[in-house]
């Protein structure tokens, strides 16, 4: 409706304006009311050191300025090409280029302004020094368009790049900004200061940084004490901050901003930062591969829903002294800490703020070092989340964390602990599903009063019934072969200059033996671990000895100047203890662009020196993990032929003649879009293969016809192929006499 009204008003004042006149641009040109001007094409040069404007629109209304084929050079990056004050119904359009002014257009105390299809680039630019985000309009930095105490404007289809600001709004309201290119500026793509009820959508604000200083003071979108705005479908990536929203002690008015479907990834600082903020909503945004995904210190009454938060350097979501924040339905993957909640030293004026009241539900945590960390936080309600393959702990409590409830969650086998209670307070955690559901195994993966008498107890029983334990008693003769799973677990570190998504996958091209190697590509410089897990729901339980030897091939791509700084291997058990084998980093540097094979006895040797954390016994080993470190430069690592000698291959089992189905499995699992389903039939007959969601509703029938005996495979595409979206599903394979099921996990 807003767009229709603006269009109608534009048509109205065009109708009442005088007939179009065709004139050249002149310096200090004064434009009167009801002017419809088409400027003569050409190249113009006008400096405006006094700052009164080359074209001046003061106290008038109903003006159209068309700059088609006009290029205007301001020469000294001072003043303004167009200066508007106390005006009404103004259109500025089609200028081919306006450059080397402080701002191309400077507007004060005006309304109903339309600026469209212009190129305002290379105006005033700074590339070093800190920016004062609290500075008012008198200290505006320069760029494309500046508006002060103005309202009801529309800015669209413009290019405003390579300068300080794209658009700067000070004390404005009701501005539509859409389909503009504000990329590659050095302060802000869009700067908003005490500016409300704007709609910002489909803009390109990527790559906004100050290259000669820390980028954290600039960003794609700055919102200082700005409320009730809608920010949707914008590219805010590769900028100092994707979004920076701040209020501090300047206002107690709730922000109530809505951010949805924005690309905020690859920020050297935060994909989204909101501090001292109230009532904001973040939905369906990408907040990946940044220093922090969402930094929400002193935020409250916030909703963080259905976002993708992956591969960040520190935390996926970090909140200091926040309260009443709802975190639901997010994909939180491959972060050192998925969600970190804590109560730190209070900022001035906020000593009464507490870290408390967090409904955290419906999220998928996958491959984080810690999924949730809660320190000195009260009343976390952690329910109906999927915790898949955490390294250190799925949920970690510290300090005086109290009155927490953990229920209805699914805990898939972590490397160390499901829950680690390092606080003195008891935790209530019944009604969760643990995979596998063996009580003795679950107990080993709960760290509480039973392990350390000074800690609070975790009440985790009764647990929901889950799948039985499927033991992998012998390590495979090549752990780098499908359908093995490998995870790259990050440690907290500094961001690299060049952002490369962290990926781990089986590489069928670059390999030494078998069908594939494992490849890790990372931009992280600090300690990152590559961790083996068997496919499906199998639990390793290897009975190794000091007489066994670990063999492996390794290949790397290292940073040319510094290379690898650290290399070690861990062999650990299922509750946090491990042997660490520390080797010289030269072993990885020697493997740069060349395959090298290494081996060492599990007793350790001079090349791989063994140390122990905890009370590790090789007879209880269940994982092997490769650690590498390049400080701050990123690397690529392949491993292949990973095996323990003497290797005992799994002996094939003859099919049971009484069974029709010998095998049902899928790879990969978890999967992001498509998974391959493999099954083996002992006898020919009718076969039906269905997929059910977590509510027991059938969402897809993949096979429903007569099948021959033997091995078969088919694919299932999660993306667009189911009605429910990412989550836990059940494969059900039915023959005339037998039914077999398998759990599969679709991640976003």
Image (cartoon, rainbow, N blue to C red):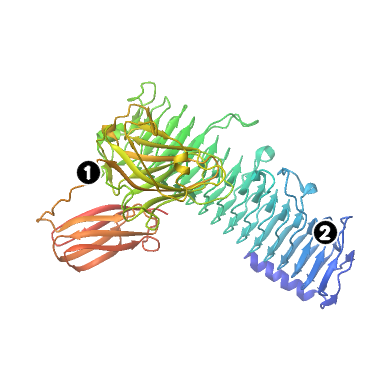
SS at mark 1 in the image? loop
Give the foreground label among 2 and 1: 1
Residue pointed to by mark 1: 648
In the rendered image of this protein, does residue 441 appear above or below residue 262?
above
**Mark 2 / mark 1, whichever is N-terminal:** 2
Tell which residue pokes out farthest to the left in this image. 658
In the rendered image of this protein, does residue 431 appear above or below residue 458?
below
Tell which residue pokes out farthest to the bottom in this image. 19
The answer to whether residue 252 is left or right of residue 373 is right
In the rendered image of this protein, does residue 9 appear above or below residue 138?
below
Label 2: few (<14), some (14–19) or many (≥20) C-alpha neighbours in 10 Å: many
User: Residue 471's image quarter?
Assistant: top left
| Residue 331, position as x, y percentages in the image | 44, 49
Residue 702 makes an appearance in the image: yes
| Residue 334, position as x, y percentages in the image | 45, 45
| Residue 61, position as x, y percentages in the image | 81, 66
**What is the distance, in whole Å, between disc 2 and disc 1 at their CAs?**
79 Å
Residue pointed to by mark 2: 80
- Residue ID at (73%, 46%): 128
Image quadrant occupied by the C terminus: bottom left
The answer to whether residue 66 is left or right of residue 642 is right
User: Residue 160's image quarter?
Assistant: bottom right
Residue placed most toward the observer, 300 or 135? 135
- Evaluate if marks 2 and 1 touch, with contact meaning CB atoms under 8 Å apart: no
Residue placed most toward the observer, 669 or 505? 505
| Residue 445, position as x, y percentages in the image | 33, 34
Residue 436 makes an appearance in the image: no
Image quadrant occupied by the N terminus: bottom right
The answer to whether residue 674 is left or right of residue 36 is left
């Amino acid at each position: 409706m807003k767009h229709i009204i603006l269009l109608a008003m534009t048509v109205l004042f065009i109708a009442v304006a005088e007939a179009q006149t065709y004139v050249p641009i002149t310096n200090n040109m004064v434009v009167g009311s009801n002017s419809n001007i088409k400027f003569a094409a050409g190249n113009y040069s006008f400096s405006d050191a006094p700052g009164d404007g080359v074209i001046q629109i003061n106290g008038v209304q109903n003006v159209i300025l068309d700059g088609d084929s006009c290029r205007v050079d301001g020469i000294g990056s001072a003043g303004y090409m167009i200066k508007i004050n106390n005006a009404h119904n103004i259109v500025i359009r089609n200028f081919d280029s306006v450059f080397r002014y402080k701002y191309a257009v400077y507007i004060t105390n005006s309304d109903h302004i339309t600026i469209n299809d212009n190129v305002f680039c290379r105006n005033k630019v700074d590339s070093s020094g800190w920016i004062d985000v609290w500075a008012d309009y008198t200290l505006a930095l320069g760029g494309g368009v500046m508006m002060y105490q103005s309202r009801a404007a529309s800015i669209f289809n413009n290019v405003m790049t390579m300068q300080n600001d794209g658009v700067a709004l000070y004390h404005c309201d009701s501005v539509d900004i859409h389909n503009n290119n504000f990329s590659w500026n050095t302060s802000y793509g869009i700067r908003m200061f005490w500016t409300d009820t704007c709609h910002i959508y489909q803009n390109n604000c990527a790559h906004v940084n100050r290259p000669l200083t820390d980028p954290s003071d600039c960003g794609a979108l700055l919102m200082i004490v700005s409320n009730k705005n809608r920010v949707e479908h914008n590219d805010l990536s590769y900028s100092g901050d994707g979004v920076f929203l701040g209020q501090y002690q300047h206002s107690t008015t709730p922000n109530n901003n809505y951010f949805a479907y924005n690309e905020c990834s690859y920020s050297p600082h935060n994909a989204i930062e909101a501090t001292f903020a109230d009532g904001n909503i973040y939905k369906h945004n990408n907040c990946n591969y940044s220093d922090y995904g969402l930094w929400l210190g002193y935020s409250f009454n916030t909703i963080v829903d259905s976002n993708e938060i992956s591969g960040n350097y520190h935390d996926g979501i970090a909140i200091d002294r926040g309260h009443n924040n709802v975190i639901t339905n997010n994909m939180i993957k491959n972060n050192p800490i998925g969600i970190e909640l804590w109560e730190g030293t209070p900022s001035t004026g906020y000593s009464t703020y507490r870290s408390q009241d967090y409904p955290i539900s419906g999220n998928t945590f996958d491959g984080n070092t810690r999924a949730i960390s809660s320190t000195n936080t009260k009343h976390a309600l952690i329910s109906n989340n999927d915790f898949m393959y955490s390294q250190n702990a799925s949920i970690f409590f510290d300090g005086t964390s109290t009155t927490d409830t953990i229920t209805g969650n699914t805990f898939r086998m972590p490397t160390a602990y499901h829950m680690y209670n390092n606080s003195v307070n008891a935790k209530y955690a019944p009604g969760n599903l643990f995979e596998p559901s063996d009580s003795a195994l679950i107990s080993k993966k709960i760290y509480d009063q039973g392990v350390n008498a000074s800690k609070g107890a975790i009440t985790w029983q009764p647990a929901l019934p889950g799948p039985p334990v499927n033991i992998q008693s012998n390590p495979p003769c090549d752990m780098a072969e499908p359908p093995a799973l490998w995870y790259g677990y990050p440690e907290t570190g500094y961001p690299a200059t060049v952002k490369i998504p962290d990926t781990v996958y089986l590489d069928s091209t670059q390999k030494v033996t078998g069908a594939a190697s494992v490849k890790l590509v990372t931009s992280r410089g600090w300690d990152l671990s590559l961790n083996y897990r068997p496919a499906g729901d199998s639990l390793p339980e290897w009975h190794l000895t000091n007489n066994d030897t670990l063999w492996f091939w390794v290949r790397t791509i290292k940073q040319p100047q510094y290379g690898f700084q650290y290399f070690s291997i861990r062999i650990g058990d299922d509750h946090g203890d491990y042997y660490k084998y520390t080797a010289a980093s030269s072993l990885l540097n020697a493997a740069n662009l060349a395959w090298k094979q290494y081996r060492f006895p599990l007793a350790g040797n001079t090349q791989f020196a063994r140390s122990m954390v905890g009370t590790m016994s090789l007879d209880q080993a269940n994982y092997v993990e490769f650690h590498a470190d390049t400080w701050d430069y990123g690397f690529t690592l392949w491993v292949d032929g990973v095996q323990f000698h003497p290797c005992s291959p799994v002996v094939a089992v003859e099919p049971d003649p009484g069974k029709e189905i010998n095998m049902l499995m899928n790879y990969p699992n978890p999967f992001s879009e498509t998974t391959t389903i493999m099954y083996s039939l002992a006898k020919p007959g009718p076969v039906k293969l269905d997929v059910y969601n977590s509510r027991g509703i059938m969402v897809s029938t993949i096979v429903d016809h007569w099948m021959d005996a033997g091995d078969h495979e088919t694919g299932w595409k999660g993306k667009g192929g189911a009605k429910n979206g990412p989550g836990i599903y059940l494969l059900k394979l039915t023959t005339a006499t037998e039914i077999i099921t398998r759990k599969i996990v679709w991640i976003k």
